[in-house]
Image (spheres, grey):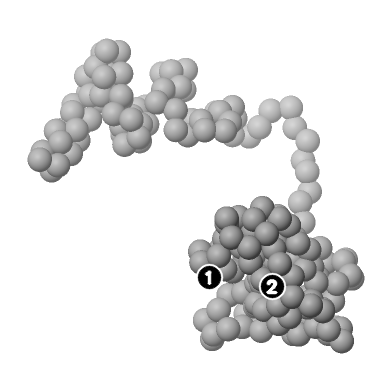
Amino acid sequence: MITEIKVEIKKLPHGELPCYATIGSVGMDLYAAVDAPVILRPLERFLSPTGIIISIPNGFEGQVRPRSGLAAKYGIAVLNSPGTIDSDYRGEVKVCLINLSDQSYEIKEGDRIAQILITPVPKIIWHSVEEFTIDETERHTGGFGSSDSPYVDVAAFEKSTLLEKERILTQKIVRNRTSLHYAAIQGYTEVAKPLFITEYVSFHRTI
């Protein structure tokens, strides 16, 4: 496990070096390097300079993330969170801030506006295939919001074992309470039994 890496950094005349706020901090604070205070009005964006240039080693990336305090208290977030800094970028690090509150917010020189992490990233080598090694999944082609669907993939369900049927329906019952009915209607008696017990116990714990 990598615990320390050396990253070269240039501090511009208007900049301040990123630093950890506490011993246990994961991200280093980034500071606004503005000549004069900037008023960020509701829903406005501002590309804040930080006054630093970094040389990230190959195999790593820089991630720019919001500060939780700014987000929770003032609604100030990093618009493209997490912002990515590629290892071959040699320009000034800038932070795209947005004000998601209904109040204006003032950004002053030296304010902590975001945090940066340097993290390892694998290099992907695509392997073109006609068929996937593992093609059948419970989700299959389900896209946005599909994991909240109250329906069971019948085709995949029919091919599964008894234990898998019980697992699938138990997961669905947590979300929408329709699995017991499905199991009963389809005649899956052995699957319906434990589901009935689960519903019975859950019901009586709430009264």
Q: Which residue is mark 2?
A: 107
Above/below status of 92 relative to 173: below
Provide residue 15's location: percent of width, then percent of height.
Answer: 80, 83
Give the residue drawn at x 86%, y 72%: 92
Picture disc at residue 201: none
Provide residue 88's location: percent of width, then percent of height.
Answer: 88, 66
- Taking the image as shown, residue 165 lies to the left or right of residue 108, namely left
Query: How far is the residue under mark 1 from the one under mark 2?
Result: 14 Å
Q: Quadrant of residue 130?
A: top right
189 or 177: nearer the viewer? 177
* Secondary element at tag 1: helix
Give the residue drawn at x 30%, y 24%: 178
Provide residue 19's location: percent of width, then percent of height.
Answer: 66, 84
Give the residue drawn at x 78%, y 35%: 128
- Taking the image as shown, residue 171 lies to the left or right of residue 128, namely left
Q: Which residue is mark 1?
A: 69
